[in-house]
């Protein structure tokens, strides 16, 4: 562990004691701590390894110019740019092996940018006074960031915050010691899905793709899962994407907090990754079980999945709207794109006799998709339910054809 270098990020003018405490903790764990000062106005009582002037320079500006912006938000955005550029440069040159950031809302805002710029598998830990807060939108959270709530984290050290900060230091040093490399020997195929009580296709798809020599990564589309998939697709790490659970798109359309951001269903196509898409789950919208449903859901069929998440059925008009949004998103794709429309249903609960069965709404959705999809998208309408074997076979038929045509790289056995 003596070779592991941890960059410790925070505002050294206001968090000097805390930063120095963290440096001591990581060094007691056998690593090397180097402090990056992302403050703007004050002067720290110690010399940081990377000063606020270094951070400003990395943003192609000066500390004086950042101060001259005269606005704390604009100043921190510029400081975040510098901290991101500097940390990424240090990581690319292998001068650091992990990132640990601390702060309130200001430094957390900055730290989220830094973490998002670092690759998957590079240890990144944020101790924040707003960790897990609804203030943090899903699209700002990188796929493997570790966060811990920094309790009692204002105005100096105390026994409570020391307990938290020492855990954060242990988390990042431990991650540096045992983190596995993310590079797969096999091409990776991403699949989106919900749990098998709702969508079942991955149970058959995963082993079939593995037989073909691919590694399969399944993402749970309850907001953060779709966000992670989109972030990794933007990095181009997938050989193909099977995006078969789009409930996060309808959630975002309906204003649900269970969403993956405005760019859901866009990054694979924009990055050039071949994608096969199906509308799993968009008969519904999710919302938090622990809060009363919004008034406009009164009278709708509601399913309480657990104490965290519930779902309600969309109206016919809402299904038409989400179909248009899906078509619009897929029109941006620069990669080969296919859309499978299961005319028999798109969620286990919308089968005949199920609580969300809505033949009129499904037909309206399918008709809208057929009318709105652009020529860059192959449309495959099948007389089957999304959980039927024929759906899986349709998806594999497209996949195999694209593999034969060289669109998807061959699997490795």
Image: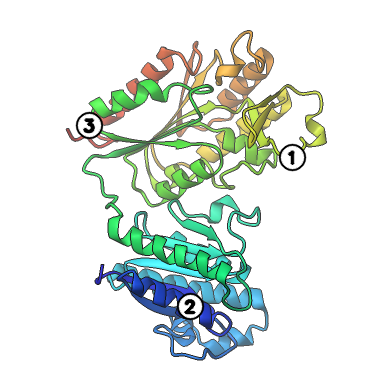
Mark 1, residue position: 291
- Does residue 182 appear to the left or right of 226 in the view shown? left
Find the distance from the CA under tag 3 to the CA under tag 1.
Answer: 45 Å
Q: Is residue 5 above or below residue 352?
A: below
Q: Can see residue 256?
A: yes
Q: How many residues crowd around disc 2 within 10 Å: few (fewer than 14), some, or many (20 or more)?
A: many
> Residue at the top extreme?
353
Colouring used for the render? rainbow
Labels 2 & 1 near each other (Cβ < 8 A)? no
Residue situated in front as seen by the camera: 362 or 229: 229
- Does residue 385 appear to the left or right of 92 in the view shown? right
Residue at point 24% right, 71% down? 3
Q: Which mark is drawn over residue 213?
A: 3
Q: Position of residue 247 (x, y in %)?
A: 58, 33
- Does residue 312 appear to the left or right of 32 in the view shown? right
Q: Quadrant of residue 185?
A: top left
> Residue at the front extreme?
159
- Does residue 316 appear to the left or right of 270 in the view shown? right
Mark toward the viewer: 2 or 1: 2
Q: Is residue 25 above or below residue 120?
A: below
Query: Which element is circle 3 on?
Result: loop
Q: Quadrant of the N terminus?
A: bottom left
Q: Can see residue 59?
A: no
Q: How many residues crowd around disc 1 within 10 Å: few (fewer than 14), some, or many (20 or more)?
A: few
Mark 2, residue position: 19
Q: Quadrant of the C terminus?
A: top left
Find the distance from the CA under tag 2 to the CA under tag 3.
Answer: 47 Å
Q: Position of residue 353 (x, y in %)?
A: 64, 8
First of labels 3, 1 by sequence position: 3
Q: Position of residue 169 (x, y in %)?
A: 42, 66
Q: How many residues crowd around disc 3 within 10 Å: few (fewer than 14), some, or many (20 or more)?
A: some
Q: Position of residue 17 (x, y in %)?
A: 52, 81
């Amino acid at each position: 562990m003596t070779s592991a270098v941890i960059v410790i990020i925070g505002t050294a003018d206001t968090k000097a004691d805390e930063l120095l405490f963290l440096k001591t903790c990581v060094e007691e764990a056998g690593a090397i701590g180097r402090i990056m000062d992302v403050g703007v106005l004050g002067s720290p009582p110690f010399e940081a390894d990377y000063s606020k002037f270094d951070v400003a320079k990395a943003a192609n500006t000066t500390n004086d110019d950042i101060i001259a912006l005269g606005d704390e938000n604009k100043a921190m955005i510029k400081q975040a740019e510098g901290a991101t550029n500097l940390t990424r440069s240090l990581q690319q040159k292998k001068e650091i092996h992990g990132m640990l950031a601390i702060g309130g809302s200001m430094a957390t805002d900055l730290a989220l940018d830094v973490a998002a710029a670092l690759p998957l598998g590079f240890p990144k830990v944020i101790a924040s006074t707003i960790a897990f807060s609804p203030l943090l939108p899903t699209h700002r959270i990188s796929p493997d960031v570790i966060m811990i709530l920094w309790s009692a984290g204002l105005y100096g050290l105390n026994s409570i915050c020391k307990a938290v900060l020492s855990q954060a230091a242990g988390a990042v040093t431990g991650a540096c010691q045992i983190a596995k490399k993310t590079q797969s020997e096999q091409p990776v195929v991403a699949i989106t899905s919900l749990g098998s009580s709702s969508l079942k296709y991955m149970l058959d798809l995963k082993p079939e793709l593995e037989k073909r020599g691919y590694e399969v990564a399944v993402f749970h589309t309850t907001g953060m899962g779709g966000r992670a998939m989109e972030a990794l697709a933007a990095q181009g790490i997938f050989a193909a994407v099977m995006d078969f659970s789009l409930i996060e798109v309808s959630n975002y359309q309906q204003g649900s907090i269970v969403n993956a951001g405005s760019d859901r269903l866009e990054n694979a196509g924009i990055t050039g990754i071949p994608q096969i898409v199906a509308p799993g789950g968009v008969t519904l919208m999710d919302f938090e079980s622990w809060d009363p449903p919004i008034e406009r859901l009164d009278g709708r069929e509601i399913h309480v999945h657990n104490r965290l998440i519930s779902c309600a059925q969309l109206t016919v008009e809402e299904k038409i709207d989400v179909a248009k949004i899906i078509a619009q998103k897929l029109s941006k794709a620069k990669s080969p794109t296919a859309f499978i429309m299961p005319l028999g249903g798109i969620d286990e609960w919308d089968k005949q006799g199920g609580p969300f069965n809505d033949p009129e709404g499904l037909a309206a959705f399918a008709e809208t998709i057929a009318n709105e999809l652009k020529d860059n998208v192959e449309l495959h309408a099948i007389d089957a339910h999304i959980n039927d074997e024929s759906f899986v076979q349709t998806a594999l038929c497209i996949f195999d054809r694209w593999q034969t045509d060289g669109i998807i790289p061959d699997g490795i056995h």
